[in-house]
Image (cartoon, rainbow, N blue to C red):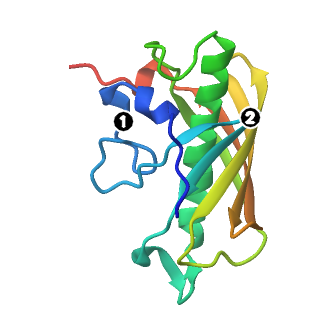
Amino acid sequence: MEEKVLQAIQDEYPDDFSWCYGCGRLNEKGHHLRTGWQKEQTITYFTPEPEHTALPGFVYGGIIASFIDCHSTGSASLALHQKNGHVIGDGSEPPRFVTASLKVEFVKPTPHGVQLKAVGNVTEIHPKKWSVETEVFANGVLCAKGEVVAVVMPNTFVQKS
């Protein structure tokens, strides 16, 4: 049985910001990654599809990097939302983050055909800049780790009609 995040920060993003290929709930072809709290850490689950193959039996590294990226920006959003006194589902719009930098280390080949679990630890660097250290596990084995510096999405990202 696959595990799921029941309360995800991505559920709270407004429609205009819900199109990300990794975590956008409105992107029909996207991964629909969902990030939530598990005690003091953040968590996201993802099961790669057959087209996410690098070599038979193993997941393509770019998918792992994307998983770390979206998990981390969602984690930063969760942390700042909580710092601002909010919880998922309270009706308040969470801050939206974008990636300033992404570093990924592939520790072991990631097996295909199993659910992956990203676990994150969030640290505030500046009120609008957060660091997230993420580890990716397959069957409890650490396969990759990464660090994302995420920044609150600038107003220049908002399209004006």
Instruction: Classify 104 as above or below 43.
Output: below
Q: Residue at x 56, y 86 (%)?
A: 57
Q: Residue at x 41, y 27 (%)?
A: 13
Q: Position of residue 128 (x, y in %)?
A: 66, 20
* Disc 1 crowd, CA 10 A, few/some/many (<14, 14-19, 20+): some
Q: Quadrant of the C terminus?
A: top left
Task: Spot the residue most to the front.
Answer: 1
Q: Residue at x 70, y 63 (%)?
A: 137
Asked if one can make out residue 99 in the rendered structure from this viewpoint, the answer is no
2 or 1: mark nearer the eye = 2
Name the residue type under label 2: Lys
Q: 94 or 37, which lies in front? A: 37
* Disc 2 crowd, CA 10 A, few/some/many (<14, 14-19, 20+): few
Q: Position of residue 54 (x, y in %)?
A: 54, 81
Asked if one can make out residue 41 in the rendered structure from this viewpoint, the answer is yes
Instruction: Classify 51 as above or below 95.
Output: below
Which element is circle 2 on? Answer: loop
Q: Are marks 2 and 1 in contact (CB under 8 Å)?
A: no
Q: Position of residue 154 (x, y in %)?
A: 50, 22
Circle number at residue 111: none
Q: 75 or 44, which lies in front? A: 44
Task: Spot the residue most to the bottom.
Answer: 56
Name the residue type under label 1: Ser
Query: What residue would you read off at disc 1?
Result: 18
Query: What residue would you read off at disc 2?
Result: 39
| Mark before the other along the chain sequence, 2 or 1 | 1
Task: Spot the residue most to the left.
Answer: 161
